[in-house]
Image (cartoon, grey):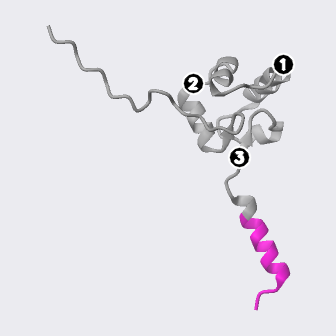
Amino acid sequence: MISKKTAVLVTGLFAGLSWSQVELNQATEMDLDGLKGFGPAMTRQVMTERAKYPFQDWADFRHRIKGLGPQKAAQLSAQGARVNGKPFEAKGAALPAAEPVKP
């Protein structure tokens, strides 16, 4: 039979392994470094920019952080990164290709 201590320990281990959200306006350096695709340079950039004023949305975040395109923003969002609690949404990604103009 499993004791209460063992059950709590196992539950805690699984909780620690679960996916969590990282609010980019409040994340620590360690939180940011834990995101795949974030390196020391990007972490410094985020910390410097948000010290000026918080990121308003993903468009503001992408504008102020150099080298962050829609693909990387989507990758970070898939890992739990959020700006003001919201995930990245690629606008226009699902739009169909334009039809060629007929002569």
Asked where in the image residue 84 lies, by quadrant, the reply is: top right
Secondary structure type for disc 2: loop
C-alpha distance separating marks 1 and 3: 23 Å
- Residue 91 horizontal/vertical position (percent): 49, 28
Bounds of the magenta span? 1-14
Report the side of 103 relative to 24 (left or right): left
Residue found 33% across the figure and 28% down from its top: 96
Secondary structure type for disc 1: helix
Mark 3 = which residue?
Answer: 21
Mark 2 = which residue?
Answer: 69
Dot 1 amino acid type: Lys
The answer to whether the residues at label 1 and label 2 have Cβ atoms under 8 Å apart is no
**On residue 20, which mark appears?**
none
* Vertical side of 21 occupied by 37: above or below: above
Secondary structure type for disc 3: loop
Of all residues shown, which one is farthest toward the left?
Answer: 103
* Front: mark 2 or 3: 3
**On residue 52, which mark appears?**
1
Please tell me which residue lies in front, 96 or 33. 96
C-alpha distance separating marks 2 and 3: 20 Å
Residue found 74% across the figure and 34% down from its top: 24
Mark 1 or 2, nearer chain start: 1
Q: Is residue 57 magenta?
A: no
The answer to whether the residues at label 1 and label 3 have Cβ atoms under 8 Å apart is no
Of all residues shown, which one is farthest toward the top?
Answer: 103
- Residue 27 horizontal/vertical position (percent): 80, 38
- Residue 12 horizontal/vertical position (percent): 78, 67
Mark 1 or 3, nearer chain start: 3
Dot 3: within a 10 Å radius of its alpha carbon, few (fewer than 14), some, or many (20 or more) residues?
some
Dot 3 amino acid type: Gln
Residue found 83% across the figure and 38% down from its top: 28
